[in-house]
Each structure stands twice: as C-alpha cells, then as structure tokens.
Amino acid sequence: MHISSLRGEQFRNLQTFELRFHPQLNLIHGANGSGKTALLEALYMLGRGKSFRESQTRHIISHGQHYFRLIAELHSHSRSHLLGIERHSRDYLLRLDGENLRSLSELAQLVPIQIINSDHFALIDQGPEHRRRFTDYGLFYHDSNFLKAWQHYQYALKNRNAALRQQWADEYIAPWHQQLADYGEWIDRLRQDYLTDLEKTLNHYHAELGGLETLHIRYYRGWAAERPLAELLNAHLERDRQLKHTRDGIHRAEWRIATAKDQDAAHHFSRGQQKTLICALILAQTQLITEKSSKQPVILVDDIAAELDRTRRQLLINFLLNSGSQLFITAIESDADSQDMDAARFHIEQGNITASKP
C-alpha cells in the first residue's frame, strides 16, 4: 500500500494543497512551526482516523473555518482507491470509493500507519496505557479475531463498572464475570504470544541500530498469575464495590523493557538510547504487521535528527529504505546525505507546501 496523492483543505495552518508522492521516499523540510508535523498529522489520519496530537479532531480545523477535508488516492496490489475524510464541528465523514465507512477499524485495515516521533518516549517512561495501546494495535493485524474479542471485553467491563458504581446487587454483577474471563484470558494469551515475537524482532533491530544490550519484555497480565480471572472477580467483588471499578483484568496489563541485568530502560537508558529503542520497536512491529497481514505499513518520521547521532540516523534511514514501506520523513534542513536519493521533496514555509528539487 502507498499513498499516491493527497489534497487538503483547511487543515491546521496548512494552505490548501494538492501533492503527489513518491511510492517509497518523501522528504519534508521547513523551519520549526512551518507545518511539517501538520502534514504528517494529515497523513496519519488516513490510516488511524484520528490525530496523534489532539484527542478532538474538531480542533484540527483551521482557525475561523467550519470543516477540514482530506482526499487521498491510494494504491494497493495494482488497485487504486479514493479515500475521503471530512470533519465539521459535529459531523465526521469517512468515505472509500464513494461508500461510507462504518468504523475506524475499516480504515486501519486499509492503510496501516506507523509514526516515529517524540510522543513515543511514552512507550518507555509513561503509564501502561501507552504500552497496551501499542500492543493492541499490533494485535489488530496479528489476529483477525482480536478486535471482536477486545470489543466484547470492553462491553462487559463497561457494564460491570456501571453496575458497581450504581451499587447493583451481586446477582446482576456476577453474570459479567464469565464474559470478562473468557475474552480476557484469550486476549492475555494473544498478548503473551505477540510480545514473545516482538521481543525477538526487537532485539534484531536494536542490535542493527547500534544497541549493545540484549532486551527483555517483562509482562504482567493484569491479575494474579496463579488464579483464573473469573475466580478473582468473584473473590474481589466487595473490594471492587468499594472502589467502584474493576481492578483485575487485561485492562490493567503492563509490560516494561529491561536489559539482561534487569535494568529498566526508562531509568537506565540515555535519551539517545531510548530513541534507538523506540525506532527498533516501531521497525519490529512494522515487520510483524507485514508478516501477519501482508500489508506494508506507511511509516512517518517526525524530526529524524532529534536524539540520534549521524551514524545511527543513517542506519535508521537504511533500514527504513530496505523495509519496503513508503516513508515520509521531516527535518528542519535538507541533509547532504540525502541529496542523491530517489525521492520526492517538499518544502513548507508558513503553511505553504511546494515541491522542491534536490
């Protein structure tokens, strides 16, 4: 899959644009605040249906305007598709080849999107919800039954928590326990298998990018390992009544990355080492998505020079080029090493995007 072209209207600070892209490498240059990240954000929305910067897509509409619109031409296996995304103050429209899409999962199936940016430091040094979200995005492509199981689990969890808050009697809460256990334990097994595969692939890329440590993913499933989930939910019902929420389950799962000496990467890695680890994580997940789904994710890289020395930056670019993915890479200035690369180049200044020559 690659994005052939993109037209955008009233998106952030970007002036109306219509761009044609290279099927592999696209380099985007411009000063800080010029709109480079906004262009990546527009591309990200083609596969995720949401921003990596805002929780509310209405905030992406240009100041003083009433909507934004993105229209992209996509190519996959000799077939072309026309994708449209439009956001008004209240309405959000997704259309593929003239037909409405019913969910963001349909969009994700069509265009897997990965991004490497400063937000991904959260995978290492912030709360477990970031790592669960990363894992579950990979599992969406890893197993076709994952999404439905996850939705069933979330539905049961939402209803049990509501019943706890409203102080319903035990006989109205207990029926949710088996559904939580059935789907939760199945997803837990998926996550364990996935993280085992991810660890192997992660170590390969981490070593190739210059990382010296062997890494291990320490996984905690979200409840006591020696007891079935249904049993714990029954045993801890009174505690959960007091808390007014469910304390045991996959929604509490966590994993951390540690060295062979059991040193947590969040506390023992420098910022540069953490950036190398993040790049290796994204490359590893990209490979697993490709292997399991036969879909090649589009990869966005925001400010490739940040926290990476020149040697590791060049190693990363080489791996990205060899991945087979379509790449969109931003930088403040054009890198002399990229001058001879076969690529489309774009310069952004105060929201105005122009195609530039090498």
Image (spheres, helix red, strand yellow):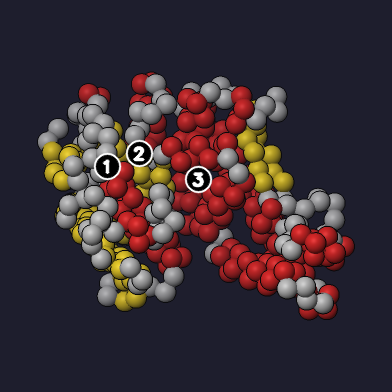
Asked whether the beta carbons under mark 3 and mark 1 sit within 8 Å of each other, the answer is no
Q: Position of residue 98 (x, y in %)?
A: 27, 75
Residue at coordinates 82% horizontally, 77% vertically from top-left?
A: 169
Look at label 1 and name its amino acid: Lys
Look at label 2 and name its amino acid: Asp
Q: Quadrant of residue 153?
A: bottom right
Q: In this image, 42 relative to 224: left or right?
A: left
* Secondary structure at numbered mark 3: helix
Q: In this image, 20 relative to 170: left or right?
A: left
Placement of the N terminus among the 4 image quadrants: bottom left
Q: Position of residue 281 (x, y in %)?
A: 51, 39
* Secondary structure at numbered mark 1: helix
Query: Along the polypeptide, which appears first: circle 1 or circle 2?
Result: 1
Cα distance between the residues tagged 3 and 1: 25 Å
Asked whether the beta carbons under mark 1 and mark 2 sit within 8 Å of each other, the answer is yes
Q: Position of residue 325 (x, y in %)?
A: 35, 46
Query: Along the polypeptide, which appears first: circle 3 or circle 2?
Result: 3
Residue at coordinates 65% horizontally, 43% vertically from top-left?
A: 255
* Secondary structure at numbered mark 2: loop
Cα distance between the residues tagged 1 and 2: 8 Å
Query: Along the polypeptide, which appears first: circle 3 or circle 1?
Result: 1
Look at label 3 and name its amino acid: Gln
Residue at coordinates 87% horizontally, 62% vertically from top-left?
A: 235
Q: Residue furthest right?
A: 235
Residue under circle 3? 285
Mark toward the viewer: 3 or 2 = 2
Q: In this image, 355 relative to 68: left or right?
A: left
Task: Decide: few, some or many residues near mark 2? Use Cα within 10 Å; few <14, some 14-19, many ≥20.
Answer: some
Q: Quadrant of residue 331?
A: top left
- Residue 303 in sight from this viewpoint: yes
Residue under circle 1? 36
> For residue 302, which numbered disc appears in the image?
2
